[in-house]
Amino acid sequence: MAKMYLNRAIAAAVAEEMARDERVFLLGEDIINCGGGLSTYLGVPEKFPDRCLDMPIAEAGYTYFGVGAAVAGLRPIVDLMFSDFATICSDAISNGSAKVAFSTQGKCGCPIVFVMANGGRGTYGNFGSGCHHSQCVESWFQNVPGLKVVAPYYPADVKGLLKASIRDDDPVIFLFHEGSTGVSGIVPDEEYVIPLTNAANILQEGDDITIVAIQSMVPIAVKAVETLKKSGINAELIDPRVLIPLDEKKIIDSVRKTGKLVVVQEAPRRGSFGGEIVSTVVEKLNGQNISVKRLGSLNAPIGNGMVEYFLVPKEEDIVNAVKELCQK
Amino acid sequence: MEYSKQDLLDMYYHLVNGRIFTGKMSQAVNDGHIRISYHSAYGEEATSIAVVSALRKTDWIVQSHRVQPASIMRLDPYKFICELFGKRDGQHFGTGYDFHLSDMAGDGRLGVPMATLGSVVPMYVGFAWALKQQKKDEIAVVFQGDGALSEGVCYEAFNIGSLYKVPMILVINNNNWAMTTPLNRQCVNPDISDRAKPFNIPTQIVDGSDLLALRQAMDKAVVLARNNEMNVVEVKNLRWDAHYVRQNSSYRDDMDEIRDAMVNKDCVKIYENYLLKKNLIDQEYIDKLKKDCAAHIDELIQRAAACEYPRFEDVYRKECIYTMPETGGDL
Ligand SMILES: Cc1ncc(C[n+]2csc(CCOP(=O)(O)OP(=O)(O)O)c2C)c(N)n1
Ligand SMILES: [Mg+2]
């Protein structure tokens, strides 16, 4: 067990999968000289020079290049730097990769992973880089049947889930958190894969209320849970890690027990994946008396610098939301 | 074309000021005042100066992330520095940095830029068409780099722009690098403007170290654009700095070329020598100008450093998110 930075966990997962399966290859901007635009593949191009492709700044073109290669039998990992740039190649992702299985009536899959940095550097109070480098995109893709969406926070989860995403036969949007590439965590030495199914992690057990925290909000929710303990509230904290396929069972079982649910995410609240979690729970527990609350960023574009932090949910927002529901 | 003495000296002032500004902003990164990647225009300043000097004040420019010397010709430099520092006195309360900074309502006439590369090319084909449609005698000039020109939308824009005859100039700042990737790993033909030719778009290639040549090319481009002929000016530059200030540049294999360019292809020195030969300036003039520019920028930096950060209510006003805030829902 060693401490590993999140960007190194990504590089390790990719290198291991490339060694295991010759069909896996990596493409994106700045791969050779920089290990990718955000240096998430350091060392990989040296190990696999024939399977690391530098691409011109042409996301629409090279993402389709990946989709084509996947249809032809290879297993591309497409790096897109910031998730905001996924708009540029959303045709390749949403109309291309997501429809291959259906358009071949199941005869052909599209085993491709789109890796991108989700969210902002301003999440934890650092200087952020504004409205084209900081957005969360999980909810943009959740409504496209055919796609899977993976959004872990801790380096160990990133590594194990990225390996599973590369082995998956369907297109996977793999999101790591932009503001956390410098976060380190314990990563097991031995090889491991975390399946995309039943992936939710119960980080803290509790009977009073359920908190579901998505990606960047996990460490903030961990702190909130500690603070709440001091007020005598025992919250159950769940990190779903994978959004599609969502581990509904663990979340529903938890809310059945607690009767209360707070979801917290960095994405803007309106139209968010957190809303999808709430709907799922409410629908499954129809007739039961449960109370819910969605937390998310304010409904505003993200400014550069200090002001990004104004928008995102903070520990006190979680604490207040929990207390509000617990008082009812 | 002959330029007046005043015109030549104005360009010299902006060139020197742009160079000093560029150096001071690199220092501001080191001093911790700038905390977002700063893409230095070091060595490429003449491109900015030639473009803006060739335009009327009523014409529009759309900045990229590496033309700050152009931006400070159009915007109050104090407000611009505050943007870079993320401070409240900035043009956008310090939330625009440089790649989200515009001046649509004021005198600066900076169009709305995009941090997603390439996107401004089609966007300003439409903008320029709308200028023409509204019978405004104005043109739009868009800056983009060699790397950005790999985006497919640029070529859709060439097609639409030549079809609809729009008053626009695309200035391609070809500095041989996109982040850490050299041009020869991005495309096979290093003359990027060649890609406009199949659309019957006039193109020019100019040496970015020669301010006068740049200005002459821009003057030609402006005449074309005023006649609704979209055209392209490709500037051959060399990126002297790393992609952003303080980036580890061990990937660079052209350090000899850069050292040589700093001596023999420095746009400031070349233009200075030209003016000296023409007896328009002397050493005393040069020294004084450089000293004055440096002192002025230092003073602005001090003021910006002392300025406070923006407040929530400065920035996230409902009318800045929806122009019709009553219909945009809750914040
Ligand atoms: C659509 C998109 N893809 C990638 C990026 C990340 N990016 C920012 S600057 C840059 C390199 C740009 O190179 P070039 O256009 O040559 O401009 P230069 O930096 O050399 O001035 C890249 C890839 C981006 N901003 N937008
Ligand atoms: Mg370039």
Image (spheres, coloured by chain):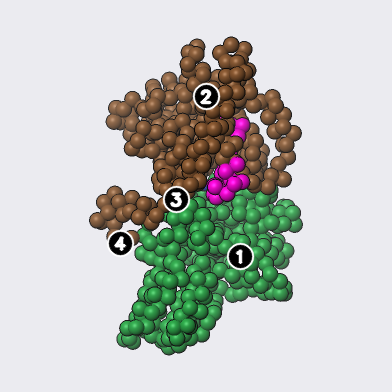
Can residue B33 be found in the magenta stretch?
yes
Chain letter, colour green: A
- Tell me residue B108's x, y (percent): 39, 33
Looking at the rendered structure, the kind of residue marked 1 is Val
Disc 2 target residue: B13
- Tell me residue B241's x, y (percent): 64, 39
Specify the farthest residue to the left.
B326
- Tell me residue A135's x, y (percent): 46, 57
Closer to viewer: mark 3 or mark 4: 3
Q: Nearer the viewer, residue A166 or B52?
A: B52
Looking at the rendered structure, the kind of residue marked 3 is Glu
Local crowd at mark 4 within 10 Å, few (<14), some, or many (≥20)? few
Mark 2 secondary-structure assignment: helix
Write down the colour of chain B: brown
Chain for disc number 4: B
Disc 4 target residue: B330
Mark 1 secondary-structure assignment: loop
The answer to whether marks 3 and 4 mark residues whose Cβ atoms lie closer than 8 Å is: no
Range shown magenta: B27-45
Mark 3 secondary-structure assignment: loop
